[in-house]
Image: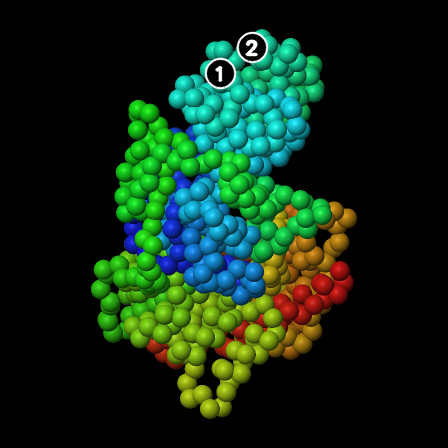
Amino acid sequence: MKQVLISKGSAVVEEVPVPEIGPGEILVRVRSSCLSVGTEMSGVRASAMPLWRRALQQPEKVAATAKLAATKGIRRTWDLVEQKRSESRPTGYSAAGIVVEVGDEIDDIAIGDRVACAGGGYAVHAEFIRVPRNLCVPIPDDLDWDCASTVTLGAIALQGVRRSQPTLGETFVVIGLGILGQLTVQLLRANGCRTIGIDVASDRLELAEGLGMDVGLEPGEADLGQVARLTDGLGADGAIITAATPSDEVVSQAFKVCRKKGRVVLVGDVGLNLNRADFYVKEIDFLISTSYGPGRYHHKYEEQGLDYPPAYVRWTENRNMAEYLRLLCEARVDVGSLISGRFPVTDAENAYKSLGDSGEKPLMVLLTYPGDDVERTRTIETGVAVRSTPGVINVAVIGAGAFAHSNHLPNLQELSDRFAIHTIVSRSGHKAVAASRTFGAVKASTDFEEAINDEDVHALVIATRHHLHADMALRALQADKHVLVEKPLALGAPEVQALEQFITAPETESVPLLLTGYNRRFSSYATRMAQLLENRSGPFMLNYRMNAGYIPLDHWVHGPEGGGRNLGEACHIYDLFTYFAGTEVIEVSASAIRPETAHYGINDNFIATFRFADGSVASLTYTALGNKAYPKETADLHVDGKTAFLNDFTRLSIHGAKVEPLKTASPEKGLKSELIAFADGINSGNWPIPWWQQKQVVTMALEVERQLLRDG
């Protein structure tokens, strides 16, 4: 399919795979999508900004990059930054089209329905888009594609008006008569309000007056005295700022034109150095309008389908979208007059140029898409030839997120004597294509099934969100593919049982290799510590501390996709314990602290202790309470009068034994060594981590989770 992407200050049209939908999502064949001059062009300009200027504007990202360099090294960090800069990114956030696929858990939208869609990253400029249920609404029968595709802009304007709480007969000043300002004027008029518009462009003032605005003023005319004269000396009841400018003067002006106890609502992006004198004496209310309405930026609402009951939240972003379409149908709002042009998606470059022309700038243009069926191709070839070198493993990487980008993909590329990256699969087609180009893959795909059924693919590296790991691993093994699946292997006992049943089935002659990504056991630090345990005369004691850092509770890691921090991260350490002991666990004890504040989750702060069959005892102290300046992972290993101290996989000191200490400039957690072990295991037929140990680690984590939940 064709998709518009932004790259280094320009819009380009590229061929990418059709996205894959999941539960609670629909696939839409787009008929029209909307480009607005403000948001769209700001994104284009940002993509052309040099790196040094971005650094000045976003110092927090400079700090994050410095932290990354400390862990990954300067060279790897530089490569990652360059990859990020060179990648094209999707654009667009408002579209309309026909539903062609419906995911599980949706029962009120059907194939063939006409829908309007919203959301950056979802309602993009592409022939096909995947959209969560709460970000799409049915289109009334009498409404055309063009008008429906403006749904996002309408919802934004409508939410700004709702925040101002207009009442019949009030007077409002609208500052900035771009597309949002034009819609805001009409919505206020539909509420029975008088409107005064302010803009520097006379043509926009004329357009707004033609659509029902009462008075139009240029900034120089719009002083307090003029607004007072137009409001019988009272001043405006409220002002809505829909302008986009770094100037602080706009907000100051909004306060000044309001009456005492008036209200100002900010919709646009303006300077916010406030002058207390502008609003203090008149006791002005200053309100922020967040995009489309309640639910915006809420992961559970937008991505997981949680809705707010109308009795408690009357107008959500979804209900705002639907109401805007109804107002269009009833001709209470005219958006057709605001559309300056239509371009086929293949001519998107000129559509963007029309928005950025130095002359008269349009408010909004539309992209149109073919009306006939477009082939839904989910895998495309990049032009790289398939490798068939003996001993080299063709691998498909499933999931092209941050972890794969910064770890597996560059490591696979460096290990070209062992691996060839054949296919990269991502739910978003543009991500699959971008990663495939960066790392030289043969194919870019959004189809997991096609990857596991490809005869040229020998093995999979699965780096998706946690809840998909076990099912994908099992399906890949059943397709006779070797699998390296990132931790955790599974989030529940039934998933482990399904894997166990396949792997140990007596009728199975040979099972492909399964390796869970417990990379720490492959670190040079772990292997050095293991030397202390060779030929030991008795059990060992190991105290491990993970200063994990705080993750907000609305992050996906804490939800059903992540399984929580015990199942999702602490399992790394349970594997280290199993690796060092080499025996089964016979006793598990776990206890968590219960802070009075709900800031922390039930498995954010706990201690888990394990006793092994050989008498060894290992404990993990896992906490989100600590300071991030302290090392993330430290450990003390005691055995036979010898002690090893591990400091964040950068330093290992040994006491009482003739084992060399170890020190590295950056953390070495075994990620590359894990891949080497994976390749060697495939070629030799020996599993780097025996199945019983991989199974035991999941069992340990599940028992810890059970005890934490019981105590909670």
At horizontal 43% and vertical 77% (from top left) the residue drawn is 477
Q: Nearer the viewer, residue 595 or 548?
A: 595
Find residue 654 and report its horizontal and vertical position in percent: 54, 58
- According to the picture, the residue beneath numbered tag 1 turns out to be 217
At horizontal 57% and vertical 63% (from top left) the residue drawn is 107
Find residue 506 and report its horizontal and vertical position in percent: 49, 90
At horizontal 47% and vertical 23% (from top left) the residue drawn is 209
Picture layout, residue 480 above or below residue 433: below
From the image, which quarter does the N terminus lie in? bottom left
Find residue 378 and report its horizontal and vertical position in percent: 35, 63
Picture layout, residue 424 above or below residue 597: below
Left or right: 484, with 387 as reference point: right
State yes or no: discs 2 and 1 in contact (Cβ < 8 Å).
Answer: yes
Which color mode does the image show?
rainbow
From the image, which quarter does the C terminus lie in? bottom right
Left or right: 385, with 472 as reference point: left
Mark 2 residue element: helix
Picture layout, residue 505 above or below residue 278: below
Find residue 559 and report its horizontal and vertical position in percent: 61, 58
